[in-house]
Image: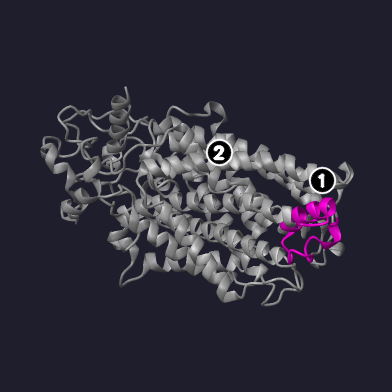
Amino acid sequence: MDSILLDNDARKLRKFGYTQAFSREFTLLTNFSVSFSVISTITGIVGSLGIAWNSGGPVSAVWGWVLVSVMTMFVGLAMAEIVSACPHAGGPYFWASVLSGRYAPFVSWITAWLNLVGQVAITSSIIFSCATLLSSQLLLFTGGAGVGVALTDAELLGLYAVILIAAGGLNAFNSRSVAWLSGFSVVWQLGGLFVLLILIPAVAPTHQSASFVFGKFFTAAQSGSGLPSNLYVFLVGMLMSQYTITGYDASAHLAEETRQADINCPRAIVLAIASSALAGWALLLALLFSIQDGATLDNGTAGGYVAGQIFYDAFNARFESGGGGVIALFIPAISMFLCGMSSITSNSRMIFGMSRDQGLPIKMVSTISPWTGTPLCAIAFSITCAFILGLPLLNSQVAYSAVVSIGTIGNYIAYAIPILCRLTISRNSFEPGPFNLGRLSKPVGWVAVLWVAFITAVFVLPTTYPVTPSTLNYSGVTVGIVLLVTITWWWSPVYGARGWFKGARGTLRRPRAATASTSLLSNTNVIFGVHDMHPDAETPHHPAAETPHQPSDSPQAPATPVQNSSAQNTEEGHNEDGSMHEPASQIASHNQHAADLA
C-alpha cells in the first residue's frame, strides 16, 4: 500500500515536470509537527510579548491574538487549497508560477525572494530570541540587572552563532531523522505548554483580575510611544500575534517529502494554525493572570525581558527566590531552539526548490547529499543568510522589531501573491485538489488578500514618535530595498534575471517547440512543455484542467517525437530552444537515492 501511495505522489510530481528527489518520510503528523514547531506559540509569545505589552498591554495581547488568529485562518485555508492542487517544495513561489499565466517568471521571481527574505528573517529572529533568553537567564542566575553577568555584544553574537549552527546541524541528518526530530519537537512544545499553563499560575501567589487581563489597555499617553491614537497603539501591538502565527508554509515546503502530499499538506496547515491559536491564547492568559508587578515588567530584574520577568517574579514572590523561574525558562529556551531547527528545515527546502528552478545563481544549492538525502548546501546557505541578518539585532530592540516585521511582511506577501493570482488570472482555470473550499473558496481568498494588504500597511508604520534614525521602523525600508533589488535584477541589461529565470522549469525533458500557456492550470505538459516518458505513465496534465484535452494531432499538442522519446531521456533538462539548461549528471546526483521511485 505504501509503495502505491509513494508511486502516486511521484507520478503527481512528474506531472509538474519534476523527478522525485527526496525520500517521502513525512506523514500528516510529522508534517504538522514542523509547521506547529515553526509557529511555536511558546517561542513567539515568550520572545516577543514585550511588543504587545509596550503597545497597548493586555488588550493588545489577548484580543489582538484573537483577531489575528481568525484572520490568519482565512490565509491558511486559501493556501491549503492551493497546496492541495500544487504540492511542490517551492511552495508560494511555485504556486505563483503556475497560477500567474504569461506573467509567471516575473511574479514567481518576486514571490520567491520575498518568501526567502521573510523565512530568513523569521529564522534569524527565532534563534536570536533563544540567545537573548539564555542571556537573560544568565543575568538572573547571577543576581539580576545591575549586578549579574550581562553578555557583551560579541559574546551574544557568538552564542547566536553557536545556536544557529547547532539548529542547522540537526537538519543535516537524513529525512527520517529530521521527521523524528519534528515529532519530538511537537511533543516538547505541547508538553512544555501544558507544564507552563499549570506551573506559572500555580506558583504565582497573587493573580491579576479578569478586568485587567481582558480589559486593561495602556493608552498612547501611558505607553510613552508618542503614537497619535489608541487604535494605532493596538495595531502596532498586533505584531506579536501575527509574527507568532507565521511559517505554516513549512508544510507546503515539505510536500516532496510527505506521503499523500495533496491531502496531508493542506490538512497540516489548517491544523497547525488552529492548534497554535488555541494554545497561544491559553499561554497568554496564564502569563497575564500571573503578573505580580506590571510596573517593572519591561525594566526589572530580567533586563527588560517581559516574559522572563513574569517567570522570575512569580517564583520570587512565592519562594523569595526567582531561581525556579529561571530554571522554568529552559522550557521556552529549548522550544525556541527546536522552532529554529524546524524553521531551517522549511527554509532550506524552499531554497532548494528555488535554486533547482534557477532562481538562485548558485547551482550547488540545488544538490542533494548522496549520504543523507537532504539539501546540505541549502541548509548551509540558510544558516549563513540568517547569521548575516542577525548582526543588526545586537543590543537593539528597534532592530529586533524591524526583523520581526520583515519576516512577517515578507512571508505574508509571498502567501498572498499566489492567492491573488488564483482569484484573478486563474479564476476560470483553477480546479482544486482533494482539499477544497467549494463555494467559499473565493470569499475566503479575498478576505485573506485584503488582510495581508492591511497588516503590510500597518507593520511598516513607525512604532514610536517622533521618528528619528534610532526609532525608525526599518522594516518598510528593508522590504522596499528587497523589492527594488529584485526588480532591478530582473530588468538588468547585463545579467538580468528575465534572461535566465523562467519560473517553474521542471527537471524532465522539454520539447523544442513547447510554449507557455496563458491558462497554466489547463495542462501541465503545456505549463512546462513536459511529458512523462515512462511507458506506463499517463499523459501528464494538471488535475485542475478545465480546458478540454487536445487530440494528439491537434496543433496545440507537443511535438510527436517528444511523446515517443524513451524514458531514459527524461532526466535531461532542456531549455525551450532545446539546449540543456542543467546537465543530466547533476540532476542524477541529487536524485540518485530516489530515482527508483520515479
Figure quadrant of the C terminus: top left
Q: Which residues are magenta?
A: 293-322
Image disc number at residue 187: 2
The residue nearer to you, when weighing 337 against 258, is 337
Q: Residue at x 30, y 48 (%)?
A: 372
Q: Horizontal and vertical percent for residue 335?
A: 58, 49
Disc 1 designates what residue?
A: 289
Q: Residue at x 53, y 65 (%)?
A: 160
Identify the amino acid type marked 1: Phe
| Circle nearer the viewer, 2 or 1 | 2
**Most distant residue in the bottom direction:** 469
The reply to whether the magenta stretch includes residue 73 is no
Indicate the quadrant where residue 470 lies: bottom right
Figure quadrant of the N terminus: top left
Horizontal placement of 309 versus 446: left or right?
right
Identify the amino acid type marked 2: Val
Q: Estimate the spatial distance between the alpha carbons at disc 2 and disc 1, rounded to whole Å.
A: 25 Å
Q: Could you classify mark 2 by the number of other residues whose Cα lies within 10 Å: few (under 14), some (14-19), or many (20 or more)?
A: some
Q: Horizontal and vertical percent for residue 486?
A: 43, 64
